[in-house]
Image (cartoon, rainbow, N blue to C red):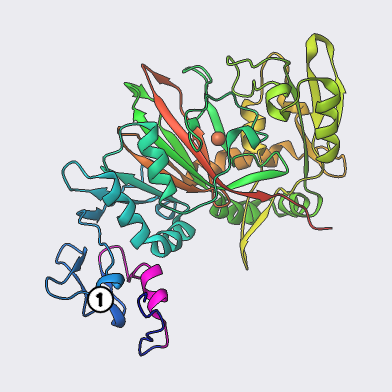
Amino acid sequence: MGQDHSTMESDGRTHDDLVNREPEVSFDNEDTMFVPNRYRGVYRVSSAGQLRQRPNAHYPRRERMSVSPLQVESLPLQADGTCDERAVPAAYQCRSASPATEDAHTWIRERRDVLQQQLEATGVILFRGFGLQTPEDFDRFVSAFGEKNFPYEESLSNAVRVVRTERVFSANEAPPEVTIFLHHEMAQTPISPRKLFFFCEIAASEGGATPVCRSDLLLERLAEEVPQFVADCESKGLKYTNVMPGQDDASSGMGRSWRSTLRASDHAEAEDKLSRLSYSWEWLDDDCLRATTPVLPAVREISPGRRSFFNQLIAASKGWKDSRNDPSKAIIHGDGQPLDQQAVFRATELAQKFTYNVAWQPGDVAMVDNCISMHARQPFRGTRKVWASLAGAERNAIAD
Ligand SMILES: [Fe+2]
């Protein structure tokens, strides 16, 4: 006979509910952890704020749950320059020596809900000292969050990247001197990831920080300063045009070929994909393709009453320039009207106030809510290896 799985807890949950669920803990701030009543006989909170299993308290064998032994504390990051304090990411520092991958996994799984709440509040969480050394470690770290993978091959990203594992690819292969300006990942395409993860394997000897910008706070300020522009963005949306080469051009931050972007081997396959995505297009000389998106949102609702400046206006106006592309022709409103360039310029200025520069240390991971925070890349010297992983594909649609 197998074990009796029908045992009920006093709160009505079954044995299987307990076995299959992680302990739910919460913080009143980043230092104080609460353990729900039903776990208090089994777990305690250490003086360092860690969840500990009490020595002589166990669930019956099948109900015993692992608890990460990692010593982790919140890491107070300081606002740099003129950065608004609300734009500073949350951060955790693991103090354990040589933390094991499995322990990091368990630590994340124990706190998924708390980390999710924190991500929704801050837009970015930095994890430092969790023992990651390779992209494969990063793949396992990301998988602990239980998010659905969004592979690069399936994305319409216009950046050239190198795929390393099923979940992991290089952040951008653009040369070190190229600045990649603030953007929401793939906001210029009909499908974008909800979350991004970055992992620093090798930090640049100089520069190479990843700026992150609270797009919701930026939109609040824009709505005060340029309300008509925000209203136009919201009601009309945007259409993006870019010219893709026939073969990858790694010298450009937007040099991904149409063959790779559309996963097409010839014009007919490319046109079929574009048609299904409601793009319009034109074939140019030198095997290039000019493609224009359907109308996409420029403002996105994060939660009721909270919205973000979800678009590529800053990156496009400052950086979408290469031998094939002219930033002034890259974006128009959904009704075909040109943008208020002064308002766009003001957005690029104001964004600095809500931008925090993540200065990488080897082993760091940053988790980014792509709806709340934009990201960028500063130029650098030396070798810099930052890997990326995407999760949670979402369709960008504009309300009729
Ligand atoms: Fe990006």
Which residue in the protein does label 1 denote? 60
Location of residue 267 in the rendering, given as x and y in whole percent from the top left corner: 84, 21
Location of residue 249 in the rendering, given as x and y in whole percent from the top left corner: 63, 15
Q: 329 or 129: nearer the eye?
A: 129
Q: Left or right: 364 with respect to 278?
A: left
| Most distant residue in the left direction | 55
| Most distant residue in the top direction | 286
Most common SS among magenta residues: loop
Q: 67 or 18: nearer the eye?
A: 18
Based on the picture, tell me whether residue 185 belongs to the magenta stretch. Answer: no
Report the residue at 22% width, 75% height from top: 42
Location of residue 41 in the rendering, given as x and y in whole percent from the top left corner: 21, 80
Q: How many marks?
A: 1
| Most distant residue in the bottom direction | 10
Is residue 336 in sight in this rendering? yes
Report the residue at 79% width, 54% height from top: 235
Examine the rendered structure and indicate whether residue 125 appears above or below residue 259.
below
Of the residues shown, which amino acid type is indicated by label 1? Answer: Pro
Examine the rendered structure and indicate whether residue 243 appears above or below residue 362.
above
Q: Quadrant of residue 317?
A: top right
Report the residue at 79% width, 13% height from top: 287
- Confirm if mark 1 falls within 8 A of ligand 1: no
Report the residue at 25% width, 76% height from top: 60
Is residue 82 in sight in this rendering? no
Q: Left or right: 398 with respect to 171?
A: right
Magenta stretch? Answer: 12-31
Q: 261 or 123: nearer the eye?
A: 261
> Quadrant location of ligand 1?
top right
Location of residue 217 in the rendering, given as x and y in whole percent from the top left corner: 54, 54
